[in-house]
C-alpha cells in the first residue's frame, strides 16, 4: 500500500485508536505495525473474525484476557534449565490464569463461532502449574512459608534464633554493670549481625568483634562475644533458607520449561484474541458495521461517516463507484465537504482491508484494492523550490505510473494551481489515462470543462456537494449524477454586491457557460424533487411492510395460542376420562369381592346397584368428555344473547363465533360495528355480528380454581429440570436460584439440578447456604457421576 496515501488519509490515527482498545501492551505494540492487505480472501476472513468477536461482546461482554505478558522468552529460558525469578514466575502464572479463564468464558453460552471456538479449544489449561506457582510465591520478592516443609522448618528456626539472640543481647544491654560502657541502650544490625553501641574509651570492657564505628569515632558497634556463636548459627540458617528458595525456584522453573510449547501456544492465542476483540471494541465504539467484499470492483458506501470527525457533527454521505462508471468528478463550493468525501472513501477502504468494521450503514460494500493512491492537500515545498502546482504534479506523475486495474485513485482539486484552460486540459488527460488503465478514480474540481467532460464521456459521472444559497452555508450532502454550480453570483448577491455589478459580470461570461449553469440548476431542481418523492415512497413501502409483518406475527401467535388451548383442553378431558375409568374399575373390583362373600339374593341386589351406578358413571363420563373435548359448549351450558351496540362495553365477555373462543371487550364498537377483543395474549378486531354475549354458569370460586389450575399447568410445561448460573455473580445467581425454586415447586417438580461449576467455590457455597434455609427444599447433595460432579447440586423439592 502506498505510504503517502496512508499518511494523507490518516490511517495511523485509526491504528492508534485500535491500539488503545488492546488489553495487553504486547498486542498494542504489534497493532501499531498493522497494514491493510490486498488479498481478498484474507480480508474477508479477517472481517469474519471481527464479526465473531462483536457477537461475543454483544452477548456476553469482554473475555477476561487481562494485561498478559510476553513470556515466550521466559518459557524458552526455563526449557534450557535457566532459573526464573519470582517476578517472572508470577508473570507465567498470570498468563496461565488469563488463558484458562478466557477458555472457560468462550466455551459457554455462545452460538457457534468457528474462529473463536477453535482458539478456545486450542488453549491448554495448565491449572495445576498455575496454582502451584501462586501458592508458592506471594509477591515479586516474597516466597510463602508453605512452599516446602523444609522452608517452613528453616523459617521457624530463624524466628526462634532471632528471639534467642534478642533476649540474650537485651540482658547485656539491660545489665546495670554495662550501662556506663554503652553509648545508647539500643540494639542494631551491621552486615546482618546484632551489635551494640559501645563508647570508644570502654572498648576493652566489652569483649567481642568490632563491626563498625560512628562518623566521629566516639562509638564502636561491637558484636558481644556471648552472641557470636548465636549469630553464626543464625547466618547458617539464613544461608540454608536462601538455598531452599533457590531450589524451589529451580523446581518451578523446570515445571515451566516442561510446558514451554503449551505456554507459548497459549500466549499466541491470547494475542490473537486480544487483537480481534480490540477490533470488535473499536467497531462498537464507532457504531461501525461489517462491509461486504465486492469481487466485481464495486464500491458502495451508505451513510458513511469519517471516523475522525466528531460523531455529533459529522454528516453521513452515500457514494458509489465501479458499477456503471469508474470515474467520479465531484464539484461544489470550497469548504463544502469535497475533500472530506475523498478522505472518507480512502480511509474506510483502508480500514476494511485491515479487517476493521467501517462507520457506514448496512449493505455497504468495498472492493479489495491492489493499491490506493491519494493526492490531497497542499504540499508545496520551499526547500525543493516546488509550487503548489508542481508539488501536486510531482505526486500525480508517480500515481499515473503506478496505478492500474483494481486501484483506487483520489485526486483533490485536479489541475488547480495553474492556468485554468491548461489545468482543465491536463485534468481531462489524466482522468482519461487512469480510466484506460483500469483504475477507479474520484476527483474534485471547480472547472466547468471537467463537468462537461463527465456529462459527455461514458464511464464518467458527475457529483456535487450541496450548498444552501439562502443560509450561505454548505449542507455537506453529496448528490450523484448532478454537477455542482460555483454559486458565485448568488453568494455575492446575498452578501450585498450591487446588482449592476453582478449583471456586468454575467455579460462578461460566454453565452454557452450561462446556459450550461441554467441547465445544471434545472437538473438539480428536478433531481431534488425526484429524491424527495422517492424517499416518501420508500418510507411508505417500509411502513406497509412493517404492518404486514405485524399482522403475520399476530396471526401466527393466534394460531399457536389456539392450538395450545385446544391441546390443554384435550389433556384435561383425558385426565377426567382416566379418573372416571379408575372409579368404574374400583367399583367392579368391589363388586367381585362382594359376590364372593354374600348370598345370591344379595348378589342380585348388588348387581342391580352396580348396573345402576355403572350407567350413571358412563353418563357422567360422556358428559365430561363432551364438555372437555375440542367441541364447543352447548346452549344449556352458556347463555347466549344477541348483542346490540349498547351491550358492547369494555370489560364484558363475549364468545367470538369465528374462532370458537371467549374474550374480554377492550373498546366500544365504531360506526361499522368493529371493536377490539382480548383473547388470552391475543388482541383481535371483530365485528358485532361475529359475537354473542356470554354468561357462564360457574361460580367465582370455581373460576378462581380453574385459573390457578391453568397457571400450575403452564408452569409445569415451562420450568426446565436444571438451571445454569455459571458466569454470574453470587447475588445474581442467588436471585435466579430463588425464583427458579419457586417455579419448580409450583410446577410440582420432584428433583432439580443447579449447575454452578467448580471455579473458586464461591457460587457453590453461596447456593448451599440458600438451599439450607429455603422453604421449598427438602434436601440437597453434590452431583454424582454423570450428574455434573462437584460442578452441580441436586435438589430434592418438598411436596406441594
Image: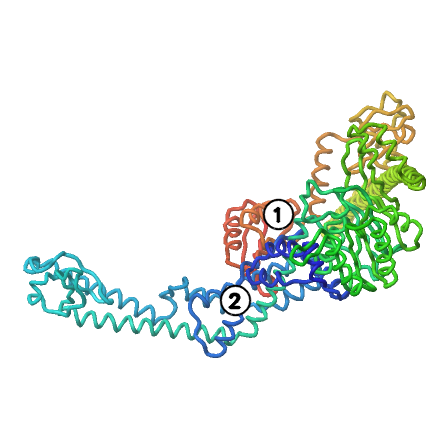
Q: Which mark is residue 476?
A: none
Q: Height in image: 327 above or below 498?
A: below
Whether residue 442 is visible:
yes
Q: Position of residue 621 (x, y in %)?
A: 81, 43
Q: Which mark is residue 740?
A: 1
Q: Nearer the viewer, mark 2 or mark 1?
A: 2
Distance between the alpha carbons at the discs numbered 2 and 1: 32 Å
Q: Is residue 298 left or right of residue 114?
A: right
Q: Position of residue 717 (x, y in %)?
A: 71, 48
The residue shown at (72%, 37%) is 707
Q: Nearer the viewer, residue 118 or 707?
A: 118
- Mark 2 surroundings: few (<14), some (14-19) or many (≥20) residues within 10 A: some
Q: Quadrant of residue 20?
A: bottom right
Q: Quadrant of residue 708?
A: top right
- Mark 1 surroundings: few (<14), some (14-19) or many (≥20) residues within 10 A: some
The C terminus sits in image quarter:
top right
Which residue is disc 2 drawn over? Answer: 127
Q: Nearer the viewer, residue 436 or 712?
A: 436
Q: Position of residue 791 (x, y in %)?
A: 56, 60
Whether residue 601 is visible:
no
Amino acid at each position: 500500500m502506498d505510504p503517502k496515501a496512508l499518511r494523507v488519509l490518516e490511517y495511523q490515527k485509526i491504528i492508534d485508536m485500535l491500539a488503545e482498545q488492546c488489553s495487553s501492551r504486547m498486542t498494542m505494540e504489534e497493532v501499531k505495525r498493522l497494514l491493510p492487505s490486498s488479498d481478498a480472501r484474507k480480508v474477508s476472513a479477517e472481517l469474519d473474525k471481527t464479526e465473531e468477536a462483536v457477537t461475543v461482546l454483544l452477548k456476553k461482554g469482554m473475555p477476561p484476557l487481562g494485561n498478559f505478558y510476553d513470556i515466550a522468552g521466559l518459557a524458552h529460558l526455563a526449557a534450557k534449565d535457566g532459573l526464573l525469578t519470582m517476578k517472572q514466575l508470577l508473570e507465567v502464572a498470570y498468563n496461565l490464569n488469563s488463558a484458562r479463564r478466557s477458555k472457560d468464558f468462550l466455551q459457554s453460552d455462545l452460538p457457534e463461532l468457528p474462529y473463536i471456538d477453535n482458539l478456545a479449544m486450542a488453549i491448554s489449561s495448565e491449572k495445576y502449574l498455575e496454582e502451584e506457582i501462586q501458592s508458592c510465591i506471594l509477591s515479586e520478592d516474597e516466597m510463602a512459608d508453605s512452599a516446602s516443609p523444609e522452608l517452613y522448618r528453616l523459617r521457624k528456626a530463624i524466628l526462634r534464633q532471632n528471639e534467642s539472640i534478642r533476649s540474650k543481647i537485651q540482658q547485656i544491654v539491660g545489665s546495670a554493670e554495662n550501662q556506663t560502657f554503652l553509648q545508647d541502650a539500643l540494639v542494631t544490625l551491621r552486615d546482618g549481625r546484632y551489635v551494640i553501641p559501645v563508647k570508644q574509651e570502654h572498648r576493652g570492657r566489652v569483649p567481642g568483634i568490632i563491626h563498625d564505628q560512628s562518623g566521629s569515632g566516639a562509638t564502636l558497634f561491637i558484636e558481644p562475644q556471648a552472641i557470636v556463636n548465636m549469630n553464626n548459627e543464625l547466618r547458617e540458617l539464613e544461608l540454608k533458607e536462601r538455598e531452599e528458595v533457590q531450589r524451589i525456584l529451580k523446581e518451578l522453573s523446570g515445571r515451566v520449561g516442561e510446558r514451554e510449547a503449551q505456554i507459548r501456544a497459549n500466549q499466541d492465542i491470547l494475542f490473537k484474541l486480544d487483537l480481534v476483540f480490540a477490533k470488535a471494541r473499536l467497531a462498537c465504539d464507532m457504531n461501525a458495521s461489517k462491509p461486504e467484499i465486492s469481487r466485481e470492483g464495486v464500491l458502495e458506501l451508505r451513510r458513511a461517516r469519517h471516523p475522525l470527525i466528531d460523531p455529533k457533527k459529522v454528516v453521513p454521505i452515500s457514494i458509489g463507484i465501479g458499477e456503471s462508471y469508474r470515474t467520479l468528478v465531484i464539484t461544489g463550493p470550497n469548504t463544502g465537504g469535497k475533500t472530506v468525501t475523498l478522505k472518507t472513501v480512502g480511509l474506510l477502504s483502508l480500514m476494511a482491508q485491515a479487517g476493521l468494521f467501517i462507520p457506514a450503514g448496512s449493505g455497504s460494500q468495498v472492493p479489495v484494492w491492489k493499491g490506493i493512491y491519494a493526492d490531497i492537500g497542499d504540499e508545496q515545498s520551499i526547500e525543493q523550490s516546488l509550487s503548489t502546482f508542481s508539488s501536486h504534479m510531482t505526486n500525480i506523475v508517480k500515481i499515473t505510473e503506478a496505478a492500474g486495474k483494481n486501484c483506487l485513485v483520489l485526486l483533490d482539486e485536479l489541475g488547480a494551481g495553474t492556468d485554468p484552460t491548461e489545468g482543465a486540459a491536463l485534468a481531462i488527460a489524466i482522468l482519461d489515462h487512469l480510466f484506460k488503465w483500469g483504475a477507479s478514480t474520484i476527483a474534485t474540481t471547480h472547472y466547468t470543462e471537467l463537468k462537461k467532460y463527465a456529462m459527455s464521456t461514458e464511464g464518467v459521472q458527475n457529483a456535487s456537494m450541496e450548498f444552501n444559497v439562502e443560509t450561505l452555508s454548505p449542507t455537506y450532502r453529496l448528490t450523484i449524477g448532478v454537477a455542482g454550480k460555483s454559486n458565485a453570483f448568488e453568494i455575492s448577491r446575498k452578501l450585498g454586491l450591487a446588482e449592476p455589478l453582478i449583471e456586468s459580470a454575467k455579460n462578461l461570461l460566454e453565452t454557452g457557460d450561462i446556459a450550461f449553469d441554467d441547465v445544471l440548476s434545472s437538473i438539480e431542481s428536478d433531481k431534488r424533487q425526484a429524491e424527495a418523492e422517492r424517499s416518501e415512497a420508500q418510507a411508505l413501502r417500509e411502513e406497509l411492510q412493517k404492518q404486514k409483518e405485524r399482522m403475520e406475527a399476530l396471526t401466527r401467535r393466534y394460531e399457536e395460542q389456539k392450538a395450545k388451548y385446544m391441546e390443554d383442553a384435550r389433556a384435561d378431558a383425558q385426565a377426567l376420562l382416566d379418573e372416571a375409568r379408575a372409579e368404574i374399575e374400583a367399583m367392579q373390583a368391589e363388586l367381585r369381592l362382594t359376590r364372593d362373600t354374600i348370598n345370591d339374593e344379595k348378589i342380585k341386589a348388588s348387581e342391580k346397584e352396580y348396573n345402576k351406578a355403572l350407567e350413571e358413571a358412563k353418563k357422567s363420563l360422556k358428559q365430561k368428555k363432551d364438555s372437555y373435548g375440542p367441541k364447543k359448549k352447548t346452549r344449556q351450558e352458556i347463555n347466549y344473547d344477541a348483542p346490540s351496540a349498547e351491550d358492547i362495553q369494555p370489560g364484558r365477555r363475549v364468545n367470538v363465533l369465528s374462532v370458537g373462543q371467549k374474550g374480554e371487550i377492550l373498546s366500544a364498537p365504531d360506526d361499522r360495528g368493529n371493536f377490539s377483543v382480548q383473547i388470552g395474549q391475543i388482541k383481535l378486531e371483530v365485528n358485532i355480528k361475529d359475537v354473542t354475549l356470554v354468561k357462564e354458569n360457574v361460580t367465582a370460586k370455581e373460576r378462581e380454581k380453574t385459573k390457578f389450575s391453568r397457571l400450575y399447568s403452564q408452569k409445569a410445561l415451562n420450568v426446565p429440570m436444571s438451571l445454569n448460573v455459571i458466569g454470574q455473580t453470587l447475588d445474581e445467581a442467588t436471585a435466579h436460584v430463588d425464583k427458579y425454586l419457586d417455579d419448580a415447586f409450583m410446577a410440582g417438580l420432584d428433583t432439580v439440578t443447579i449447575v454452578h461449576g467448580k471455579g473458586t467455590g464461591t457460587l457453590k457455597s453461596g447456593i448451599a447456604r440458600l438451599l439450607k434455609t429455603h422453604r421449598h427444599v427438602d434436601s440437597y447433595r453434590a452431583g454424582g457421576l454423570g450428574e455434573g460432579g462437584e460442578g452441580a447440586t441436586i435438589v430434592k423439592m418438598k411436596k406441594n
